[in-house]
Image: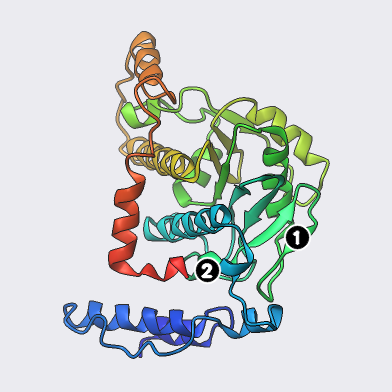
Amino acid sequence: MDRFALAYANDRGAPQHRKITYFANRLSAGFGGQYRGNIDRRVGKIDDMKREKNPDGKSVRELVSAEEWQKRVDLAACYRLIHLYGMDEMIANHVSTRVPGEDHAFLINPYGLLYEQMYASGFIKIDLDGNVLFNPTDYGVNQAGFVIHGAIHRARHDVDCVIHTHTLAGMAVSAMKCGLLPLAQTAMRFLDVGYHDYEGVAINLDEQERLVRDLGNREVLILRNHGLIATGASIAEAFNNIFRLERACQLQVMALSCNTELSMPPREVVEASNRLYLPGVRRRFGLMEWPALLRKLDALDPSYKD
């Protein structure tokens, strides 16, 4: 057993059947895939945490609406994809989404699990004042997560999903006075970017007003000396935005490291390109990509749906 598998096995937040799925995937990766699916999965689908929270034995899926369950599945997929594409930072950061039919509630991750350990049944439902409405885990909610995500969900009714990351490229660009540069088509997607000056760890409620002000009606916000925020009208669109924003930051860090004069496109070309990527001009970017991304996850490890 490698050290990553051992750490995963010892994590009290990982349901037993997900540990088995993880080991199956590690084995198949190590032996060319021929052993995938041969691990015994007879362990029940309700882990110890859920039994404690739901003594009647009902699963989280049975306790929420069909619409909320689908949101939970998509949210878990988003966390797994962020990990898959290298945008996570251990247990830090958050992805949140509104609860269908509950305008003042949203789902957020239990603070203590890695992104690759997220699964549909494990998310915590809180309201816009930070009150816990439903927690099927033994974990709590990170205060900074509530401050940032709660502020945006309260102010922006058009936003369904909020993603916050601390990637190296994102933090690097957040420290640059020049901000995000339209160096290539990917970066031109975000011509209108908000910037929020660093005020320390985001645990003070009075910062919420300034976060919302600096985001405005934009889709993305760069937190100076901190990281990135991307929003979207759906989980799929928010993931597409953070993926593209991260690529734009990676591009900028790489280009500036080349120590050569850069070619900047004319402003009118940048603006015309930007318009073609705005939501609704050609299509809502992210929706077409989402089913393909889910198929990718299903092939790797479908336990995000648990």
Q: Which of 110 and 205 is in front in this view?
A: 110
The quadrant in which the N terminus is found is: bottom left
Crowding at dot 2, Cα within 10 Å, few <14 / some 14-19 / many 20+, comes out as many
Distance from disc 1 to disc 2, alpha carbons, whole Å, reads 22 Å
> Percent from the top left, x then y, of residue 193?
54, 27
- The structure residue drawn at horizontal position 71% and vertical position 62%, both measured from the top left corner, is 141
Look at the image and tell me whether residue 304 can be seen.
yes
- Tell me the kind of residue under disc 1: Leu
Return the disc, 1 or 2, that comes first in the chain's sequence.
Answer: 2
Most foreground residue, 64 or 103: 64
| Left or right placement of residue 107 versus residue 19 in this view | right
Q: Tag 2: residue type?
A: Leu
Q: Identify which residue is drawn at 31% across, 25% down.
A: 262
158 up-or-down from 235: above or below: above
Q: Considering depth in this image, is 50 or 222 the residue closer to the camera?
A: 50
Callout 2: helix, strand or loop?
Answer: loop
Q: Of helix, strand and loop, which one carries label 1?
A: strand
Asked if residue 229 lies left or right of residue 23, the reply is right
Q: Dot 1 corresponds to which residue?
A: 133
Q: Nearer the viewer, residue 189 or 161?
A: 161
Left or right of residue 133: residue 62: left
Q: Residue 93 carries which label?
A: none
Q: At which x and y percent is residue 286?
A: 38, 39
**Residue positioned most to the top:** 268
- Residue 260 location (% of width, % of height): 29, 30
Disc 2: which residue: 114
Q: Position of residue 119 (x, y in %)?
A: 50, 67
Q: Quick check: 145 above or below 121?
A: above
- Say above or below: 305 vs 52: above
Quadrant in the picture for residue 284: top left
Q: Nearer the viewer, mark 1 or mark 2?
A: 1
